[in-house]
Amino acid sequence: MFKRNTLLMFLTLGLIALMIITVGCGAKAPAPAPAPAPAPASSPEPAKEEKPAWPQKEVEIVYHSKAGSGGDIFLRAMGKAVEPALGKAFVVNNMPGAAGATAWNYVAKAKPDGHTILGISSTLITAPLINKMPVNFMSFEPVAMMFIDPMVIFVPADSPFKTLADIVDAAKKNPGKQKWAGGTPGELGVVAGRELMKAAGFKVALVPFEGGGDAAVSVLGGHLDAGIGEYAEIASSVEAGKLRIIVAFNKMPTNQEIPTVAEEGYPDVDVRKLRGVVATKGTPPEVIDALVKVMKTAYDDPSFRKYFESNNLIPEFAAKEDFLKVMELQHEQIKASLEN
């Protein structure tokens, strides 16, 4: 009996052992831990968008007066000087009309990218004050003032008036009889004439013209007694002996012998006609800076230097904020003059 029980016990134990081995061999091994996912490749930083260089095409510079005016002559001479530095054509577009507003509105509404700019004189300051225009010098980005353009009073070469005193005395004796060319309506020449009449106590009729060239032709033809304008507009006629300058509002660098209005007894008549360039409001600062640099290079061009020296232009460079201050001061001066 004992042996039988012992045998059964061993058989049972063997069976249990066999089951354990079988289960152990059939069990799945634990799955290996997943390999860590590779770190995503770092995406490259987006390339910084480079702003296109200026200019991308020809630059159009608009002016408010006709071809042959002092400003037109100035801009065409400047264009020849700046084109090499610009690398593109510099095209003058004359837009006379509406006392300057036609040109000014065109540029004020242009795309502000520096490819359409405005050549200006003091007319941009005077005309809006005289004619109550909504557009004025504050409607644009100041780029650079380059010159003061001496204004003069001129007469036909055979005129009996040799001096300022001669023409003033004659005007006092015959009030309103004389007629003078006064430039574009609202132009600084009109202001200059009014200021001189006020200071010297005489009266003449100031006849407006859309361009200085037309004014000079009328004086040459004997239709008017005298004219007020820039030297550049009449230089060829003066050199040809057809017109004669009797007085200047500013001392001319190469014609020192011509007396000024101040030297003739009217020091309070202060007239300074500026020449410069402005751009459409909102033009990027880097484009304005590029424009300033291009304008400055004109001074170093031999042909442009010959032009401005022969035309008695007075170099007076002022860029951006400094140019704005000049225009603000002239605005206040002319406003006060017109109110008195």
Image (spheres, rainbow, N blue to C red):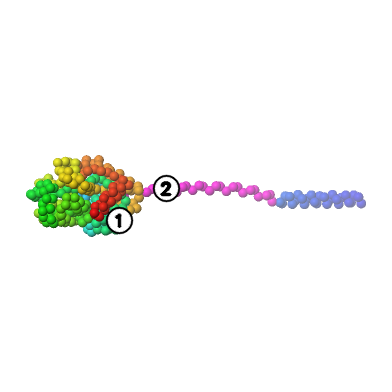
- Residue sitting at 16 percent across and 52 percent down? 201
User: Is residue 270 a member of the stretch shown in magenta?
Assistant: no
291 left or right of 268 in image: right
Measuring from the top left, give residue 195's x and y in whole percent: 20, 51
Measuring from the top left, give residue 338's x and y in whole percent: 24, 54
55 left or right of 311 in image: right
Q: Quadrant of the C terminus?
A: bottom left
Instruction: Look at label 2 and name its amino acid.
Output: Lys
- Residue sitting at 15 percent across and 43 percent down? 258
Point out which mark residue 48 bears: 2
Instruction: Look at label 1 and name its amino acid.
Output: Ala
- Mark 1 lies on a secondary structure that is helix
Q: Is residue 321 visible?
A: yes
Q: How many marks?
A: 2
- Residue sitting at 11 percent across and 48 percent down? 166
Q: Quadrant of residue 104?
A: bottom left
308 left or right of 56 in image: left
Point out which mark residue 23 bears: none
- Mark 2 lies on a secondary structure that is loop
Residue placed most toward the observer, 233 or 151: 151
- First in sequence: mark 2 vs mark 1: 2
Q: Nearer the viewer, mark 2 or mark 1?
A: 1
In three-dimensional space, the C-alpha distance between marks 2 and 1, rounded to whole angstroms, equals 31 Å
Point out which mark residue 108 bears: 1
Measuring from the top left, give residue 103's x and y in whole percent: 25, 56
Which stretch did the figure color magenta? 28-56
Give the main secondary structure, helix, strand or loop, of the magenta stretch.
Answer: loop
Residue placed most toward the observer, 294 or 198: 198
Q: Residue furthest right?
A: 1
Q: Is residue 189 visible?
A: no
